Amino acid sequence: MKKLGLIINPIAGMGGSVGLKGTDGVLAEAKRRGAVPLAGGKALRALKQLLPLQDELTVFCARGEMGADALKELRFAYHEVYQPVDFPCTYEDTRMAAKAIASAGADIIAFAGGDGTARDVYEAIGEKLPVLGIPAGVKIHSPVYARTPEKAGELLRLYLSGQTALTTEAEVLDINEEDYRNDIINTHLYGYLRIPFERRFMQGGKSPSPGSEKSQQLRIASFIADEMQQGHYYLVGPGSTTRSLMEYLQTENTLLGVDVLLNKKTVAKDISEQEIFSLIEERPAKLIVTPTGGQGYLLGRGNQQISPPVIKKLGKENIIVAATAAKMAGLQGQPLLVDTGDIEADKLLHGYVKVVTGYRESLVYRVE
């Protein structure tokens, strides 16, 4: 029997759509704002790719929503090797579960969460055995994660069936969420985890925009500002490229939240999914986003406030993509990505988009 370990951080990603930029230390507030669990569903999306191996696979997991519930739903054979004392789980539960699964003899551990979950797995087992991240958190800078839950499942299937055996080291990166909520990005390298080596399935590490790109960002900002229509809302997503637009207009902004412009002035800052949807019901609206450097995600990473219902309401024609030529070149031909958790919303963006790269300069780029 092939032996898989599974860990689900059930609270991962809950702070995203409600504008909290993470869930660490703010779970109660996230729930108060209407956040719902997401990680279990994303783990199911990955596990469905393993159904062809169902009769050849046994899974070591933690009890309940940390793993067993998802496996039971899909009728996988599993053994609970760790039982959390209480729910919701803590980072200590993730670490204890990882240690128990490694001791049980798993061939590889799959974990659903974000950067904090990857850090906990690293602290527990280091490079003792291969692991693979199923993306489910708000912030996912670490390249230990697959591009989507489905890609994670496909790669696990290849690894467990012996169709790929190579592994490589990947960085475990994390940031302080309290600083992050205050628009301060302080990324720290905690170590390395061993992952299956198949680049086509994996996301890259997050790359910051160099200071030398500032003048190009301002040219992008100048063009977008000149093209703005009176009476329209403009939702401005996170990132230094989009922030340059706010600076150009000399209006209030947040670096890591979603702000709203009307007639080139800020009318709302750092708003949640529900607040966004209420606004775009009032009048025509457009969305301005920039892909994550080095990874190429347009939506689904760090901007979960721009939810599937928001995307469907706006339509592809009202989404403005902006990025410097250097950022696009840094993707090395890899497509732009979306992973909103909703197949219809993702498909809406598939194909090609125009990317504003300067003043009256643009290129057409593929979205996978």
Image (cartoon, rainbow, N blue to C red):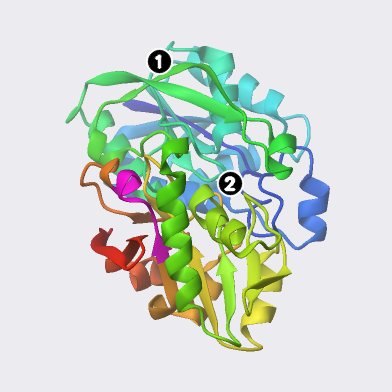
In this view of the protein, which residue sits in the foreground, 59 or 223?
A: 223
Please provide percent x and percent y for residue 19: 69, 56
At 47% from the left and 31% from the top, the residue drawn is 142
Kindly tell me whether residue 45 is visible in this rendering: no
- Looking at this view, name the residue that lies furthest to the left: 163
Relative vertical location of residue 84 with respect to residue 312 in this rendering, above or below: above
Could you tell me the amino acid type at mark 1?
A: Leu
Is 276 within the magenta? Answer: no
Left/right placement of residue 213 relative to residue 302 reads left
Report the residue marked by disc 1.
Answer: 129
Report the residue marked by disc 2.
Answer: 138
- The magenta stretch is 321-328
Write down the quadrant of residue 58 in the picture.
Answer: top left
Label 2 vs 1, first from the N-terminus = 1
At 58% from the left and 15% from the top, the residue drawn is 124
Please provide percent x and percent y for residue 216: 40, 51
Q: How many marks?
A: 2
In this view of the protein, which residue sits in the foreground, 27 or 250?
A: 250
